[in-house]
Amino acid sequence: MNKGLFRLSRHPNCFGETLVAWSFWLTALDAGSTGLLTVFAPVLMTWLLLRVSGVTMLDEHLRATKPGYVEYMARTSAFVPWPRRRVPRGPQ
């Protein structure tokens, strides 16, 4: 997939879920000091999506099953939408 946000991020859905979790936490801050205590929730969600069930697991699976995914990984940011990197080609 090289269209839309997938051109800028391999996992834009995971990034969006993380933004939602952090926005809920920012909303909870309005409750005062008790809202601050809820910071564990977005931290846990971010860690799970980056290291356990999201980006890492999907990349391993897609690398093994989709031809060309390794090149896509080299060009495209894993999580945060970011402009594509240039990948040097081999000797010509």
Image (cartoon, rainbow, N blue to C red):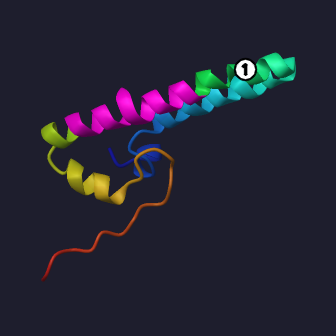
Place residue 66 in its image quadrant. Answer: top left
Horizontal side, residue 46 vs residue 60: left or right = right
Place residue 88 in its image quadrant. Answer: bottom left
Q: Residue at x 44, y 27 (%)?
A: 48
Where does label 1 land, which residue? Answer: 37
Horizontal side, residue 90 vs residue 33: left or right = left
Relative to 79, residue 75 above or below:
below
Q: Position of residue 91 (x, y in %)?
A: 13, 81
Q: Main secondary structure of the magenta part?
A: helix
Front residue of 46 and 74: 46
Relative to 63, residue 92 above or below:
below
Whether the magenta-drawn stretch holds residue 52 is answered as yes
Tell how many labels. 1
Quadrant of the frame with the N terminus: top left
Q: Position of residue 79 (x, y in %)?
A: 45, 44
Quadrant of the frame with the C terminus: bottom left
Q: Position of residue 10 (x, y in %)?
A: 38, 44
Asked if residue 54 shows in the view, the reply is no
Horizontal side, residue 35 vs residue 72: left or right = right
Q: Position of residue 20 (x, y in %)?
A: 62, 27
The amino acid type, in three-letter code, at marker 1 is Leu
**Image: magenta residue range:** 43-61
